[in-house]
Image (cartoon, rainbow, N blue to C red):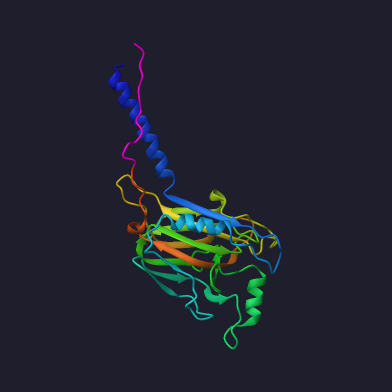
């Protein structure tokens, strides 16, 4: 076999391996969990999760927006439409409402605050958060519909998996499923069976990979679904500090002007 043919076959094998690796994972996932074992009424300190959020935000331009729900009134219900700079609007669907960790006389229900806070829900900034539910059925589970194609999606979640809930985050583009970020694959959070992880918090940031043509994988719907087979059909959790970004709002790392080369050495 000629030398030129051998080199062509070797380069073809390397290229095929790179394409295969890229096609397996269409999204980069940045996540961390701050675990709480203190029992009801206690909450994890936001530490590693804050670092994960900063890592996620470092990949986005400074023009992106983060929704912390502080501007919404107590008990604002499902159907919330949130505007993001340059990234359109996000419509929160499924069961959900704005709750608070603080009591406002004559406005908030102190019993509800005590109940939700005691069982692990919390806010990652300020005092408000979105109380919602992931379920096994896709029709009523928490989902977010987006008016623009986005390439990045990050958020805090409080109290996931304290009673066996295994979460899949399904990503859709024009009605087609283009990615699944599963707790079982990415170890996003530890799953408990009897509430012993109450008050734990996880940060999850998802970014579309750059494809061969230079564009990024995008999506316009995010759905939170419980998929485990142990009988758990729903998981109530607190959702806060939602950040989204379009592909144009991603920070692209400049290519190395002196990329590494492959040297071939042949014996005489």
Q: Position of residue 92 (x, y in %)?
A: 46, 70
Residue 259 placement: quadrant = top left
Residue 212 placement: quadrant = top left
Which residue is nearer to you in this view: 12 or 52?
A: 52
Which residue is nearer to you in this view: 192 or 42?
A: 42
Q: Give the overall secondary structure of the magenta segment.
A: loop
Quadrant location of the N terminus in the rendered image: top left
Which residue, as the protein is rendered here, is positioned at the far top? 268
42 horizontally vs 205: left or right: right
Q: Position of residue 210 (x, y in %)?
A: 36, 48
> Which segment is the magenta one?
256-268
Is residue 248 positioned above or below 147 on the image? Answer: above
Q: Position of residue 157 (x, y in %)?
A: 55, 63
Judge whether residue 227 can be spotted in this image.
no
Which residue is nearer to you in this view: 254 or 90?
A: 254
219 horizontally vs 140: left or right: left
Residue 260 painted magenta? yes
Residue drawn at (53%, 56%) of the image? 51
Residue 230 placement: quadrant = bottom right
Is residue 67 positioned above or below 14 on the image? Answer: below
Q: Position of residue 64 (x, y in %)?
A: 39, 64
């Amino acid at each position: 076999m000629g030398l030129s043919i051998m080199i062509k076959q070797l380069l073809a094998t390397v290229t095929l391996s790179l394409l295969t690796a890229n096609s397996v994972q269409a999204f980069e996932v940045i996540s961390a969990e701050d675990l709480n074992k203190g029992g009801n009424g206690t909450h994890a300190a936001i530490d590693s999760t804050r670092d994960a959020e900063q890592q996620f935000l470092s990949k986005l331009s400074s023009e992106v927006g983060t929704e912390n729900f502080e501007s919404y009134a107590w008990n604002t219900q499902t159907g919330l439409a949130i505007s993001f700079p340059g990234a359109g609007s996000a419509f929160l669907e499924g069961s959900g409402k704005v709750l608070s960790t603080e009591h406002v006389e004559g406005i908030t229900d102190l019993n509800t605050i005590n109940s939700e806070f005691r069982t692990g829900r919390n806010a990652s900034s300020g005092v408000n958060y979105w109380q919602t539910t992931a379920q096994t059925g896709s029709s009523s589970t928490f989902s977010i519909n987006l008016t623009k194609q986005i390439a990045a999606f990050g958020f805090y979640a409080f109290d996931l998996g304290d009673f066996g809930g295994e979460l899949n985050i399904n990503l859709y583009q024009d009605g087609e499923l283009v990615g699944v970020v599963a707790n079982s694959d990415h170890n996003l959070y530890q799953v408990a069976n009897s509430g012993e992880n109450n008050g734990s918090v996880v940060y999850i940031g998802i970014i579309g990979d750059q494809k061969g043509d230079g564009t990024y994988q995008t999506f316009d719907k995010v759905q939170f679904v419980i998929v485990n087979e142990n009988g758990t059909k729903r998981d109530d959790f607190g959702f806060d500090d939602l950040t989204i970004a379009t592909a144009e709002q991603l920070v692209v790392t400049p290519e190395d002007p002196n990329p590494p080369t492959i040297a071939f050495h042949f014996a005489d």
